[in-house]
Image (tube, coloured by chain):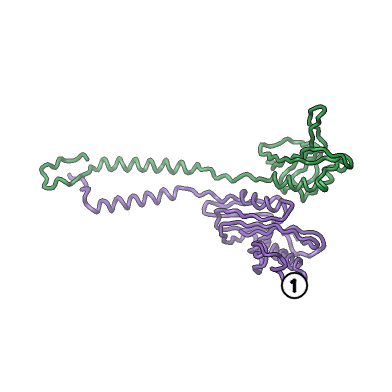
Chain colours: A purple, B green
Amino acid sequence: MDFEAPMDAWIVYVGVATVAGAVLGVSFGFSPIPPPDANAATNAIDSVGGSTVSGSTTYEHDAESFWLDRQQLALRNEGGTAKATIAFGTMTGVHYADSDRLADVLYGTPIDEAFSGENPDRAFLRAVGEAQLQAAGDRGEWKATEGKIRVRKVVIDGNALAFTTDNQGIDDYDITDGREEVILVAV
Amino acid sequence: MVGRRSSLSPSNTRGQAEPNVALIAIAFLVIALGLFAGYHQGISQDQADRAVASPTLDNVYNGATDTGRFETTTALSDLLEPSDLPRGHAVYVTVTYLDTDTGNIQTVDQAYFDEDGRYMGREVDNGYPNNVQNASRPIAISPSEGDDHGGRLTVRVWKNQ
């Protein structure tokens, strides 16, 4: 019987190329992608949020979606989900705000330019309170991310935010006298 | 390539392959693929360690000093608030200086706070786990007005497991 395959027939090369392609696909399927590093991301947030002066930083990550609330950040990609808690202060995710004004402050616009009116600090704190309430309500709903975390710490003297809580978390906010440290985060 | 001698064949450019060799080659390929997959399953997917000691040191320094001096008249347990301390981490703070007369390190004040920021005493009562992070910096110790000497502020931060 004649089992030999003629090596110069083009069909043999097509077969070899197909098998090679299939093997390559299988090998890529075996390479696991690690889940995103939420600890390193919260280290970056804490380096700004835990400092005693205003500042900002950025951190690149490899997550595809995220959610955050006042103290927790969760990141997810094909490799899995990771969650971590910040050690200092409370976060305000600018994606949970109704308008882009909080994002403008995060990216460097001074508060009195981003918030018009006779008391920009109070308007800013109102936007922060709304965003934190929205984040608490959206907890667990994944949003798409761009791959970079930006953090900025803003210190407001003269006005502060006071939250009221019910048994599920924060319920409402009020603007009082005092001093407030706001950590703005964009993921 | 081993095959039938084709000296009688009209074209001496034909090459031929035996199936046994091809099957053995594919078997090696599959074995290699299995080793590759097994190696990749062991890739570490650990997350980075939380680096909390440095911001904690900044906050503790800010809370413990007024105008950059640590006045020994008030204890650390009264100067530091839970908002200065990292959430979820236990903290042990010491203020020390080197006594130049005796050559020993003297402790001026020390305090241990639990994960909720509550003051628990001067000593750590249940030992350190193996993930302690340390940070320290110089601090000016001022036992009385005008009398300053140099010391060291050290914080140890860890999560109880």
Residue located at (32% from left, 43% from top)? B26
Residue bearing the label numbered 1:
A117
Q: Looking at this view, is A43 or A37 the one in front?
A: A43
Q: Looking at this view, is A45 or B150 the one in front?
A: B150
Q: Looking at this view, is B157 or A65 the one in front?
A: B157
Residue pushed farthest bottom?
A117
Residue pushed farthest front?
B146
Above or below: residue A6 compared with residue A164: above
Q: Looking at this view, is A45 or B119 the one in front?
A: A45
Residue B20 percent location from the top left of the image: 26, 40
Q: Residue A96, can we see it?
A: no
Q: Residue A145, can we see it?
A: yes
> Which quarter of the rendered picture does the C terminus of chain A lie within?
bottom right
Total numbered labels: 1
Toward which corner of the image does residue A104 lie, by quadrant? bottom right
Residue located at (77% from left, 43% from top)? B113
Residue A40 percent location from the top left of the image: 61, 49
Residue A116 percent location from the top left of the image: 72, 71
